Image: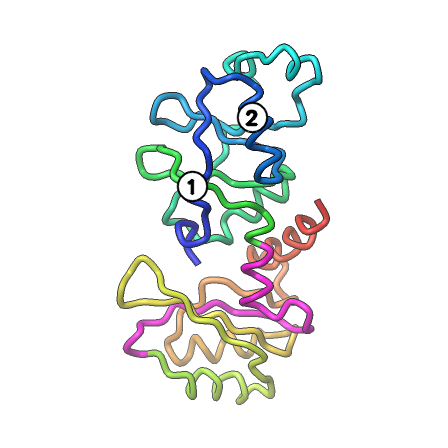
Amino acid sequence: MLASKLMIQDFPIIKESDNIDRVSEVAFEFDVFHVPIVKGEKYVGLLPFDILSELDILEDKKILEFRNDLLPISIKESDFVFSAIKPIADMELTLMPVVDENEKLIGVIRNIDIIKYLSQTISLSEPGSFITLMVNQRDYNLQEISRIVESNNAKVLSLYLEPTNETDEMLVTLKIDRKIISHILATFNRFGYQYLAHSGFEEHNNDLLDRYRLLMKMMNI
């Protein structure tokens, strides 16, 4: 799923000229510890609520005073949701700002929203692996995809389809009941399928597996 599809669009806009009490209100309302800050139309960074002392809040200081504490982190609206998992886990963020091509803040994705999305689309509780394919909508063939998996003595536990920016392409995410999937990946290659990511446990440098592990870490934040 693209970031633009999962983000909260009506998240309050907080300017660096606002007072700290505005940050407190938004943090408690949305149950987050990080709040995006803008200057004019442009997003400038993420303010960690936990760096603020009780005195800062009581004195109702200007956000501008904490400009050096802002975290310059965000993703584009056209990025996939998976791209938010690593920075959220590494930096223990409670949300990820989403910006457009002009760095204008257009929404946020909370870590809880990512967890809910993944739990709905991927059978995380079942042992196995998952593969994400990029498929032209006209070429999508569920029977062929299942046959490729089953020809390697494996089964498809779940399957989820989602559109991409390209109107004629979509992502097909498969959950498979095997941890070793090199033969399955080779068969998909042989049939001309493009896989974007996978979590085969025999792969030591697999980006999606790293993100899966980071998701597990993120769930314990």
State left or right for residue 172 relative to residue 29: left
Residues shaded magenta: 115-139
Q: Is residue 175 above or below residue 213?
A: below
Q: Is residue 127 above or below residue 30?
A: below
- Occupied quadrant, residue 196: bottom left
Q: Which mark is residue 23?
A: 2
- Which label's residue is closer to the chain start, 1 or 2? 1
In the image, 171 versus 57, the foreground residue is 57
The residue that mark 1 highlights is 10
- Residue at the (53%, 89%) spot, across then down: 151
Residue 183 part of the magenta-drawn span:
no
Mark 2: amino acid: Val
Dot 2, crowdedness within 10 Å: few (<14), some or many (≥20)? many
Q: Position of residue 52 (x, y in %)?
A: 66, 20
Q: How is the image coloured?
A: rainbow
- Residue at the (37%, 76%) spot, across then down: 192
